[in-house]
Amino acid sequence: MKHFIIIAVLVIASTLAIHTGLGSIGLLPRLASAQGVSIDQLFGIYTWAIAFVFSLIIVPLFYSFVVFRRKKGETGDGVYMEGSSKLEIAWTLLPLIAVLYLAYLGAQSLSETRRVDPSAMVVKVIAEQWNWQFQYPDYLFASKSLYLPVGQQVDLQMTSLDVTHSFFVPEFRLKQDILPGRTVDLRVTPTLIGHYTVECAQLCGKNHTTMVADVYVVTNADFQAWAKQQVANAPKDPVLIGEQLASLYGCSVCHSTDGSKKVGPTWLHLYQSSVALSDGTRVTADAKYLNNSITDPNSQIVSGFSPNVMPATFAQALTLTQIQDLIAYIESLK
Amino acid sequence: MKKTKTLGLLRGLLWQVIGTVFGLGFVTAIRVLMRLPAWKTEPAVVVGALFGALFFLYGVGVLDDWLKWAAGEETPEHDESDWGWRRYWGPSHDHKVIGIQYLTLALILFSVGGLFALTFRTQLAGNQQFLSPIEYNTLMSLHGIVMIVGILIGISAFMNYTVPLLIGASDMAFPRLNAFSFWIAVPAGIILLSSMALGGFDTGWTGYPPLSIRAPLGMQMFFLGVSLSSFSSILSALNILATVIRLRTRGMTPFRLPIFVWAAIATSIISLTATQLIGLAFQMVMLERLLGMGFFDPIKGGNPILFEHLFWFYSHPAVYVFILPGLGVISELLPVFVRKPLYGYRWVAMSSLGIALTGFLVWGHHMFASGMAEYLREPFMYSTLLVAVPTGVKFFSWVATIWKGKISFPTPMLFVLGGIVVFLLGGLSGPPNGTISTDLLLNNTYYIVGHFHDTLFGGYVLPFFAAIYFWWPKMTGRRLNEKLGKLHFWLMGPAMIVLTLLMMRIGLLGMRRRVDGYDPALGFQPYHIVMTIAAFLIGLSVIVFFINVFLTRKRGEIATGNIWESRSPEWQVPSPMPLHNYEKELEVVGEPYDYGLPGSRYVKFVGED
Ligand SMILES: [Cu+2]
Ligand SMILES: [Cu+2]
């Protein structure tokens, strides 16, 4: 009996000590989203649970090392005891109830994070090796950093142009993989004005590490001012817009404008030229052909190149106007 | 038996070279016949590597008997009594030799994987790039997969060496298949490592497409190497199960099996039934790359999430393949060193099966942030947390076993206890990954890295060394030095704890995994420096172990008797174990762990009283 009282006291002391210790070093980064509130609460429960279960095992273990160790010169065996079904059932059932309760809390906290605000602002997130682009459809411009008005839910509609990426801002507590060929949603309500970084959290090749972008949470007034400026700064000439799009969407990774051959054919003097296709026919590179090459690249393959190299996702990722702008840009390279 | 004069391994390697050249030529010839441009690197190299592995198996000699049977010839039992040390370098059929072969390969892979880790850890400590991004990614990815293959091999080492001894059998049920299972792992390992010379790969050990469809040629060597080594797992699992079912000695009823055997059964059930899925998933990506089949690439109508499901359907249960044998070693050795019965034997045995079975239902917890179907997330959360229950049973039973024992602390016991503590850290850090909302922060951060390193250090590495120190005298007739053994432990155990706790710390603060640097402003560098020092201490401890092996090889304390006063059958005969194990038949006459019950016995030899 004496043993058990000592152990009970030690377990309580150790639980309190560990919990205080963990609390005082600050385990989590600052919290900057409404979705994170319930997540942090759950982390709080975990800190208690872990401190307690850890003590529950470690204290009797180390207590035994000291009290029941074989003293010098001692021989013979320990106390013979085989087991007790009652105890075994107890330490099966109690943890069972505990983990089911935890799972229930987890489900609740998940549904908190998934609350939908119908008036959320939509931002389209385009991820590609190895950069981010944020499009604001309500304002018709695109940006390399993410500006968000504080206190308002945003619906991030995310897609990838190549491999799987992942949207991760530690202060928002949320993470969502971004898949090619598909749009996935993530809803965030920023609650704290400040500067954060969005990092790609899914290994996406060589420069995965540097696939980061700035996130600014600002007041609504600041946001409106910024958006206005972006709209004002945005070029009006389709050729210029097209040039921007070509770099934003990585076309220029594969297509040169100086006549050199990269992964794909050059765009220099392409417009109205006669293009040899891999099936042996020739076509004139008019606007219709260019449109088709962008939206359905595998239908007409330029001779000397392979199908499936150029992403077939642009039809979804680009708006019709954007495609027109790109074509205007290619035309200008005649 | 002329073949015993040359070393099987050398013959195998020679044939592997021949086979590779043959494969390269074969593909080129077909292309010429099809009027295609003669040389295309990727298919030629993949087929070359595949033929290289097959030729290796022929060259090393593990197919000999089967080829003769196919030709209608009889083959005599191998008499290996006068092979001497050559037994270890060729296709022996003796489970003890194969066990030691596996052990050697496991230690080699463990060291190679560790060196990779030390290399990229050094970069993280300095936060200065001296590895190019692709070099970094290749080393990081190979560290993962080499360790995993090394662990699978290490497990085979112990199951092979001990299971027949523990159940009183003279060998495994299928000795030739056993040799085959080992020797296929050798070319598989070579192919896996050859990826470094073929452009590397930058996908991590998970190899997710579409990234792996675009990765350099080294990717194919990764897929092929893992696919080949999966044969090793599947076949040796089959062999273990057949052995336990058919070859138990008289009186060895299921609940009188040594507890490690229960762990081996649970592990083998998983390996036998789940490994196919990772092999399949990897082969599908190989075919996608070679023949343009669009399984996973959305551009061709494929689905990347499908790969993740196939991959994790194996790779989650695989975690239990890694740790169940380790937990089995803990349960097996504790009673010996506390001189008390294993508390709740049946519950511990059943908890292994319980973990194995629930382990099949939880793979989706790796995909909470993947964008998989929404309705799947919560069921996977519930099933995941359930795994904590049988795991808890093990911990409580261990504590109760130790309670009121007569505890002594020789080296194997230190590793056992270290294993319990480190595995506890791994276990307790698990549930936050299991509830979806908290996992949305933790997924793909260093927290996960810390969590699984704790489960593997505690559930595999420390028990693995406990088993080595414990059974070494059985294998060699000599004991490893206690002082060096303790030094090994006190370097390794605390360093592991520091390393993993700091990993979790920076992960919680938002450090992503699989990055080759980080923004200095985040303040992670001091942590990385300490972690790197800890990693080097772990490396140093392994060097101490190798020194111990080297020094005691010739001059170690002779230990031919039952030095641990164990009740287990293998310790009732002199060490090293005789060629055909037990000369007299064994009979089980009592419970395995009745330490402290006067006059009780576990086994006796038939005819003896
Ligand atoms: Cu990325
Ligand atoms: Cu898992």
Image: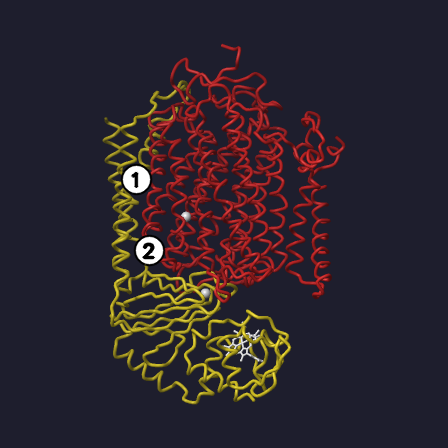
Chain colours: A yellow, B red
Q: Between B527 and B311, which is closer to the camera in this rendering? A: B311
**Residue B306: image tag:** none
Q: Is residue B294 left or right of residue A73?
A: right
Q: Chain of mark 2?
A: B
In this picture, is A35 found above or below B165? below
Percent position of residue B360, x then y: 41, 44
Q: Is mark 1 within 8 Å of ligand 2?
A: no
Percent position of residue A101, x then y: 25, 46
In this picture, is B504 found above or below A210? above
The amino acid beneath tag 1 is Ser
Q: Chain of mark 1?
A: A
- Identify the image quadrant of residue B266: top left
Q: Is residue B400 left or right of residue B122?
A: left
**Rendered-image quadrant of the N terminus of chain B:** top right
The amino acid beneath tag 2 is Tyr
Q: Secondary structure at mark 2?
A: helix
Report, in whole angstroms, how far the alpha carbon at label 2 lies from the one at label 1.
36 Å
Percent position of residue B574, x then y: 57, 20
Tell which residue pokes out farthest to the right in this image. B2
**Residue A55: image tag:** 1
In this picture, is A145 found above or below B343? below
Residue B491 visible in rendering: no
Q: Secondary structure at mark 1?
A: helix
Question: Which residue carries the number 2 mark?
Answer: B375
Structural crowding at the residue carrying mark 2, measured as other residues with C-alpha within 10 Å and reported as few (<14), some (14–19) or many (≥20):
few
Percent position of residue A33, x then y: 28, 64
Structural crowding at the residue carrying mark 1, measured as other residues with C-alpha within 10 Å and reported as few (<14), some (14–19) or many (≥20):
many
Q: Between B89 and B127, which is closer to the camera in this rendering? A: B89
Tell me what residue is drawn at x 52 percent, y 46 percent: B147
